[in-house]
Every structure is written in structure tokens, then in C-alpha cells.
Image (cartoon, rainbow, N blue to C red):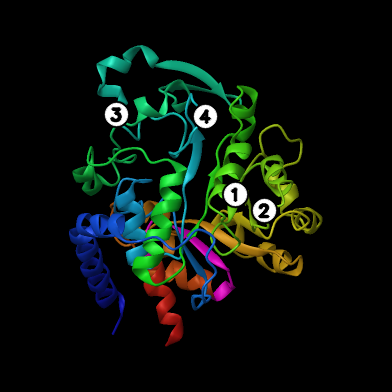
Amino acid sequence: MSLAPRRRSVLLATAASAVATAAASAQAVASAPAPASGAKGPRPPRPFGPVVVGHRGSAGWRPEHTAGSYIHAVRAGADWIEPDLVPTKDHVLVVRHENEIGGTTDVAGRPEFADRRTTKTVDGKAVTGWFTEDFTLRELRTLRAVERLPQIRDRNTVFDGREGVLTFQEVVDLARRLSHESGRRIVVFPETKHPTYFRSIGLPLEEELVRVIRRNRLTARDCVVQSFEPSSLRRVAAAHLGLPLWQALGTSGGPYGHKITYRDMMSPAGLREIASYARWIGPDKSSLVAPSTLLADAHAAGLKVGAYTFRAENQYLPATHRRGEAPNDFGDAFAEYAAHYERGVDAVVTDFPDIAALAREELRR
């Protein structure tokens, strides 16, 4: 008999429980004492199998980059949580998928900010909307987060307006409190977004990121820094923080402002160059499917491989793992995880950390 029905029942029960208790857990986590900054303590047990990275928290179940999303991710089994970093006008790092926030906050419905709507060229592309760099932190604090993909994840819209915009410092604090609550060390996995653009307008990301890392005495056990731009990672590396760096890789083109392409970077020679400054690569999961040799080549270069982005909806799954015709219905996500775990990936970046963790648990059997 197929295990799929049992798996889906377990998943839905787990998700329902996590959603029901997220508000209570947020209050408990907020009041829990944080470990002393820089405290060593015993090293927690390493997770069995690949690392599960909560993509913007648990974006499949909650509006991304909210405290509720991160709490849900950790309670569901995520080992790392990912905040995307963009700056405010007063140069505070906040956590949003993009600096354009028309689709992730309620700013479009706020008449006091109507005149902030504008068009900018970000990394060579014209973008219209509202941008974090045009708001002070105080102003951003008045906005409320909303589901970014309401046509796909309409169930998440029930949480619209319930939480605000977090700073990177608040995510670091939350990770420490979640570590205390869960008994596991939760790693913060920040991504520098559009670093060349922000440097060009006088709001460089790396300097402020380094300040936060140093202020909190984050170590290799606490933080891994990622970017699609090698120059951003090299700037972080120059600070000699001793943190692992993760070179994210696109499926086409190349890093903005660089002549090299992602295809070049995924060649054996390119991987050896990445290994000179980074410990990880993060390719799209499609880049690892046969006949690709990327996984083996990366391991040969001494790099770990974390694939992105795993989701449960049919439209994001390979055709062989889809169930039914509706693009937003869940397919057999377990089968996709199993295939990549068998390939030997070192991490998965996922909107559904509960499914990834449950699929990983099956490796023990």
C-alpha cells in the first residue's frame, strides 16, 4: 500500500497543530531568556541527513519573513532560517524578500504613503512600487505584512495584517530564543539582496551586516551568509568573521555587474574559484538533475551543496510528482525530497520545512 495518504495525514495534522499554537509560541519565545551572547556551551547534535533551511521561515504556511513564519519553521523541524536583507532610509537592515514592498506589506492601501510610489531601476530592471530605502525604520514599523502569493496560497491570507516588518537584529534575537525553546542551535542564514544597487545609492549592505554579526558575536555555529553576487561575499570574507559563505547560483545569466555567467561558475574551474572564498553553493534544484554533474563536481571541489527552492504545489514539482490537474494542489513532494536526498545534497531550502524534515526522518528507516 502507498505511504502517500499516511504522509499527507501526518503533514496536515502537524501543520494544523503548528498554526494553532504559533501565536502562543510567539509569546513564549519572546519571554524566554536568550543564551548569553557568544556563549559556547555544548555543541548540539548535528541533524541527521541534509540540513533543512526554512525559506523565509515557513513561507508555505505563513506570510514570509514574519516572526510567525520563522517560529512555524523551527517548530516544524527547520535547522536554519533565512532572512533576506534590505536597508531602510536610515540604514537599518530589515527583512523583506525585495526592497519593493507593495506585494509583501499593506503599503499600497496606506494613503499617507501614496506619494512614495515610484519607478526605479534595480539591477538593470525597471521596478514600480514602494521601496524600503525610501522609508525610515519608524515608518516601516507602521506597515503590516501580507501574503506575497495570495493567488497560490490563499490560505495564508488569513494572517494578513497580523505582524509587522522585522529588523535583522530581531531575527537574530528570535533565533536565539528559538534555540533556547527547541534545545537546538538555530542558524541564521541571511541573504544580501541587490548589494551592488544598494552600494550605488550609499546604503551598502555588507558593512551593516558585519556590524550586526560582530555586535552579536555570531560564530560559524550561528550564521551562514549567502548572496548571488560574489563581490558581496568577498566583502564579507574580507571582514574575517570566520563564517561560512554560500554562493547562490541562478539558472541563467550571471551576477549583476559581473561578466561571468552562472553557467561558468558551475563549471569545475568556476567551482574551484568559488571554493577560494565560500564553503557552499546554492543552485536551483533543477541544476542537479541528471545528466548534470554539478553535485559531484562541487563535492570534488570541497564545496557543500544546498538546493533551492522546494515547494509542495503541483506547479513547482516535476511532472512525475504532480497529483491531479490543479496547479495549486499539493503533489508528491516527498518523492522529490527523496530523489534529492538520494543524490547526496547537503541541504534543502524549502517553503515547507515540515515536509522536508519528515522526508529526512524517513532516511533513518
- Tell me the residue that label 1 is attached to: 214
What is the three-letter code of the residue carrying label 2? Answer: Leu
Give the foreground label among 1 and 2.
1
Q: Residue at x 38, y 45 (%)?
A: 65
Label 3 Cα crowd, 10 Å radius (few <14 / some 14-19 / many 20+)? few
Of the image marks 3 and 2, the number of the one nearer the N terminus:
3
| Relative image position of residue 63 (x, y in whole percent) | 31, 45
What is the three-letter code of the residue carrying label 4? Answer: His
**Contact, CB < 8 Å: mark 4 with mark 2?**
no
- Tell me the residue that label 2 is attached to: 241
Which type of secondary structure does the marked residue at label 1 adopt? helix
Which range is magenta?
342-354
Of the image marks 4 and 2, the number of the one nearer the N terminus:
4
Q: Is residue 204 magenta?
A: no
On screen, residue 233 versus residue 309, left or right, reads: right
Q: Which mark is residue 91?
A: 4
Of the image marks 3 and 4, the number of the one nearer the N terminus:
4
On screen, residue 5 versus residue 80, left or right, reads: left
Residue 77 versus residue 253 in the image, above or below = below
Which type of secondary structure does the marked residue at label 3 adopt? loop
Q: Quadrant of residue 195?
A: top right
